[in-house]
Amino acid sequence: MTQFQSVFKHELAEYLEISQGTVSDGTLRSTRRTLFSFDSLLVAENADRVTETAINHWIRELQQINAPKTVSDKVSYLRKFLRYLQYKGYSVFMPACPKTSDSYVPYIFSDREIQTLLSCADSWANRHTDPKTRRTDMEFCMLLRMLLGCGFRLGEPLAARVKDINFRNGTILIRHAKNNKQRVVPMDRTLTEMLERYCIAMGIKTEPESCLFPAARGQEFSVSKGTFDFRFRNLLRETGLYVQEKSHSRGQCLHCFRHYFAIHSFAQAEKNGRPTDDSVPFLSVYLGHHDMDETEKYLKFSGDMFPEYTELFEDYAAGVFTEVAYEEK
C-alpha cells in the first residue's frame, strides 16, 4: 500500500486510522485520495508547515482538473484533517471552502402548514371505512408524528420493529442507520404514549418481531417508502399546500420534516439558554450524523420563512461549517 511521505506522514496515517469505522467506506476512500494528493504537494515543495501558500497552490491544481463541486468536497476533506492537526497542537492555515452554485435550500414547512397537514391526515383515518385503507391511514398519521418529533430519516422508523421500542424509557433503537450506525433516540413522553396506543390499536404491541409499520402482506414486512411518499403528495394536493419544485431544491417531501425538526430544535435550545456551541454537537449526534459538517445543511433555510432565526444561524455557521454534499435520504 502507498505510504505518506511528507513531514506529516505519521499524522496523516493516524488520522485515517482513527477515521475507520466512524465514516462510510466511500467517505474514507475519498478522504484517503485527497490526503495523498496533499501529501504529494508537501513533498514536492519540501514543506515543513501547512502554509497559506501551499494550500492555495494545492487548490489551484485541483481547479485545473476538477469541477467546482469536486474541489469543494476535496477542500472539505482536507479541512477535517487540518482540524486534527490543530487538535495535535500544530499551527496551520485553514482554507475557506470554495462555494459552489448548487447550494441546496430545503423547503421548510411553517408551523401552520404542519398543523394543516396533520389535521388533514387525521381526517383520512376517520373518513375511510375500508379496514385496509384505514390501517394504512393510521400508519401514515403515526409516521408523520415520528418524523416531526424525532427528525428521523424516512427509512429509519420503517426499518424499526416493536422490540426496538422501550415504552418505559421512551426510546427507540435505530439499528441500521446511514453509515452502518446504530443509535438510541429519546422520544418526548407524549409521542411515546401516542406510539404505544398506536401499537395496541394495530395489534402489534405484544409482537416484538413485527415491523413498526407492517405491510398488508404480513407483520414481517414494512410499508414501502413509495407508499408513504405517494400518500404525502396526495396530502399536499388536498390541503392546497403543494408548491412546484424549484431549481436546487428537492421540493416538498417527507424528508423536509427532518429539516423542520433540526431548525426548531436548534432555535428552541437557544431560547432555553443553551449556548449554540453546545446545542449543535447534541443535535448532530441525535440526528445520527458522523460529524457536525453533515449537520450544516439542516441549518439552511429561506430567510423569509423564519426571519427571527436567520441571524442566529448565520452567526453560528459563519466560518464553522464547510460545504458538504447533500445526499442523505
Image: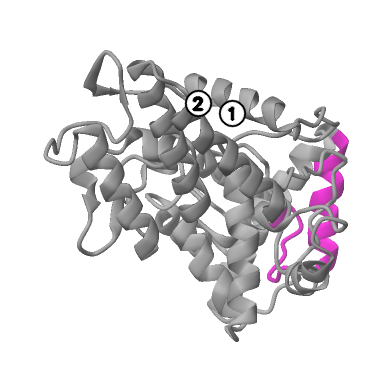
Which disc is residue 228 wearing?
2
Element at label 2: helix
| Residue at 85% in and 50% down | 99
Q: Residue furthest top?
A: 217
Q: Quadrant of residue 202?
A: top left
Q: Is residue 252 left or right of residue 188?
A: right
The residue positioned 41% from the left and 41% from the top of the image is: 142
Q: Residue furthest left?
A: 206
Is residue 294 shown above or below 317?
Answer: above
Instruction: Kindly tell me whether residue 217 is visible in this rendering.
Output: yes
Q: Position of residue 207 (x, y in %)?
A: 13, 35
Residue at the outermost bottom position: 273
Depth check: give the residue in front, 29 or 236: 236
| Mark 2 in CB contact with mark 1 (< 8 angstroms) | yes
Image quadrant occupied by the N terminus: top left
Residue 1 in sight in this render = no
In three-dimensional space, the C-alpha distance between marks 2 and 1, rounded to whole angstroms, equals 6 Å
Direction from residue 325 to residue 319 in the image, left or right: right
Who is closer to the viewer here, 278 or 108? 108
At label 2, the amino acid type is Phe
Residue at image location 39% in from the left, 42% down from the top: 177
Q: Secondary structure at mark 1?
A: helix
Residue type highlighted by circle 1: Phe
Name the residue that disc number 1 marks: 232
Residue found 59% across the figure and 28% down from its top: 232
- Bounds of the magenta segment: 41-64
Q: Main secondary structure of the magenta part?
A: helix
Residue 12 place in picture, x, y as percent: 53, 59
Within 10 Å of the Cα at label 1, are there few (<14), some (14-19), or many (20+) other Cα atoms? some
Q: Residues within 10 Å of mark 2 (few under 14, many from 20)?
A: some
Quadrant holding the C terminus: top right
